[in-house]
Image (tube, rainbow, N blue to C red):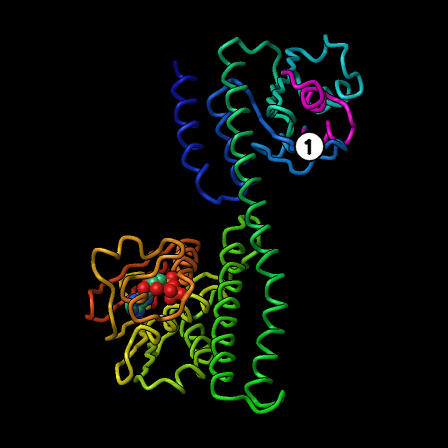
């Protein structure tokens, strides 16, 4: 009964992570630790194996599990590789009496290992690796425990296949977007030459056509850039290095990037940061992109002579960035979809304001990755306020006032 309860809990934990972009290694480490909690074993490990039998990735419930996994993969023999190769579970309840895999048995006994049970991570037509359970005392696992272990191995396989599919999709999107940018740069370059009269004087009709090509090539470039950013943010294994940073510096950097846009805009733009630093643990480039996206929207969706502001505050243990404008606003009934991909409000479409509908998806993803949240207060023609709250870096609470 206890094992069944434990299994139910682990299964529901997994069901939830299936739809997140949690890194594969983190998920497998968690799984093997939970297996040790619910089954009568001392350690558990997973090796993902490629057809050359080199492990792609190893996860373990503790140091000893990692050692046992390496033992098998470095020796090139053992129940883990056998389960992978035969697609069947292998049970070795007492290594001392077992005549299979003699080299592995000798080394395992020397490490204090007494029993091993391995389960293939099997899919229809291929095996991804094996789940290995280790015991430092002799004895078989009973049938329900064996079934539980195989169920967990199957769940791990489902997770891995899902993660693989997501990674392949992200890679595809990233490659296509990247490849699109080279011809787009060339098109934009030639458009500029034509506009500058380098190809001869244009009639006013020709100039209008060239301007339309220029606008649309800018749109495509923006779309390619946004798709590239989205795929990078969704890749669970891509590196977004985190440091402790002052959000005021992030806002200054964003302000620098926005300067050309602000200079040509007829809106009043203000930035406000507190005298004391507001320290969060995050990725400076991603946080800068977040502010740039919110401010670009505020500028885009506010009429000439309107105003836009960006304020940084530290309130009750959180950092807060508020981007406000008195522009077109977003109809209340449409706000539910604001952070979904390619969403564009009816107002944006009516006023033919250009955009990809990916900016807020990017912002939302960055906020989530930083453990924060984002909210919006707005209404049709009533302006908008986007508020991002981020946790302060550990140790910087003392300066909170
Ligand atoms: P894009 O701006 O490229 O269309 P976003 O994902 O950044 O894409 O924004 C999605 C939509 O949300 C916009 O098209 C617009 O309808 C609405 N929106 C975002 N920010 C604002 C704002 N400050 N004021 C009014 N509408 C906004």
**Could one spot residue 58 in this view of the protein?**
yes
Residue 150 location (% of width, % of height): 54, 19
Residue 275 location (% of width, % of height): 34, 79
Residue 169 location (% of width, % of height): 55, 46
- Ligand 1 neighbours mark 1 (CB distance < 8 Å): no
How many circles with numbers are drawn on the protein? 1
Q: Quadrant of residue 189?
A: bottom right
Q: Where 173 sits versus 260, above or below?
A: above
Nearest the eye: 193 or 55: 193
Nearest the eye: 307 or 223: 223
**Could one spot residue 397 in this view of the protein?**
no
Q: Where 256 sits versus 399, above or below?
A: below
Residue 5 location (% of width, % of height): 38, 20
Q: Is the C terminus in the top left, top right, bottom left or bottom right quadrant?
A: bottom left
Q: Is the N terminus in the top left, top right, bottom left or bottom right quadrant?
A: top left
Neighbours of disc 1 within 10 Å: few (<14), some (14-19), many (20+): many
Residue 172 falls within the magenta-colored stretch: no
Apparent side of residue 365 relative to residue 150 in the rendered image (left or right): left
Q: In the rendered image, which residue does mark 1 sit on?
A: 49
Quick one: SS at disc 1? strand
Residue lying at 50% horizontally and 72% vertically, measured from the top left: 218
Q: Quadrant of residue 394?
A: bottom left
Residue lying at 20% horizontally and 59% vertically, measured from the top left: 332
Apparent side of residue 372 relative to residue 73 in the rendered image (left or right): left
Query: Which residue range is magenta in the image?
Result: 69-88
Q: Where 365 sits versus 108, above or below?
A: below
Ligand 1 appears in which quadrant? bottom left
Nearest the eye: 172 or 78: 172
Q: Main secondary structure of the magenta part?
A: helix
Residue lying at 58% horizontally and 84% vertically, measured from the top left: 194
């Amino acid at each position: 009964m206890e094992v069944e309860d434990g299994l139910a809990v682990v299964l529901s934990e997994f069901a939830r992570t299936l739809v997140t972009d949690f890194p594969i290694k983190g998920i497998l480490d968690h799984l093997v630790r939970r297996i040790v909690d619910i089954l009568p074993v001392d350690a558990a490990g997973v090796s993902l194996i490629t057809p050359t039998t080199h492990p792609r990735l190893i996860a373990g419930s503790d140091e000893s599990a990692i050692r046992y996994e390496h033992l098998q993969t470095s020796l090139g023999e053992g129940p883990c590789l056998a389960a992978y190769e035969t697609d069947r579970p292998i049970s070795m309840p007492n290594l001392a009496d077992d005549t299979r895999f003699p080299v592995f048995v000798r080394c395992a006994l020397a490490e204090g290992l007494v029993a091993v049970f391995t389960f293939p991570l099997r899919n229809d037509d291929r095996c991804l690796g094996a789940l290995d359970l280790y015991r430092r005392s002799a004895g078989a696992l009973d049938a329900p425990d064996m079934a539980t272990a195989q169920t967990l191995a199957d769940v791990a396989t489902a997770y891995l296949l899902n993660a693989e599919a997501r990674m392949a999709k992200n890679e595809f999107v990233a490659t296509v977007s990247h490849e699109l940018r080279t011809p787009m740069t060339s098109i934009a370059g030639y458009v500029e030459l034509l506009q500058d009269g380098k190809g001869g004087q244009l009639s006013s009709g020709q100039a209008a056509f060239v301007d339309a090509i220029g606008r649309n090539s800018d749109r495509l470039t923006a779309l390619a850039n946004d798709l590239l950013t989205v795929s990078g943010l969704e890749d669970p294994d891509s590196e977004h290095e985190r440091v402790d940073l002052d959000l005021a510096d992030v806002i200054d950097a964003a302000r620098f990037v926005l300067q050309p846009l602000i200079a040509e805009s007829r809106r009043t733009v203000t930035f406000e940061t507190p005298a004391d630093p507001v320290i969060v643990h995050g990725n400076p480039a991603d946080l800068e992109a977040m502010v740039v996206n919110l401010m670009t929207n505020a500028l885009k969706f506010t009429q000439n002579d309107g105003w836009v502001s960006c304020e940084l505050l530290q309130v009750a243990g959180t950092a807060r960035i508020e981007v406000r404008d008195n522009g077109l606003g977003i109809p209340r009934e449409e706000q539910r979809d604001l952070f979904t991909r390619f969403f564009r409000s009816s107002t944006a479409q009516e006023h033919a304001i250009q955009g990809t509908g990916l900016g807020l998806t990017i912002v939302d993803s960055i906020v989530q990755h930083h453990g924060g949240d984002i909210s919006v207060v707005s209404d049709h023609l009533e302006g908008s306020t986007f508020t991002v709250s981020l946790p302060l870096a550990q140790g910087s609470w003392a300066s909170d006032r």
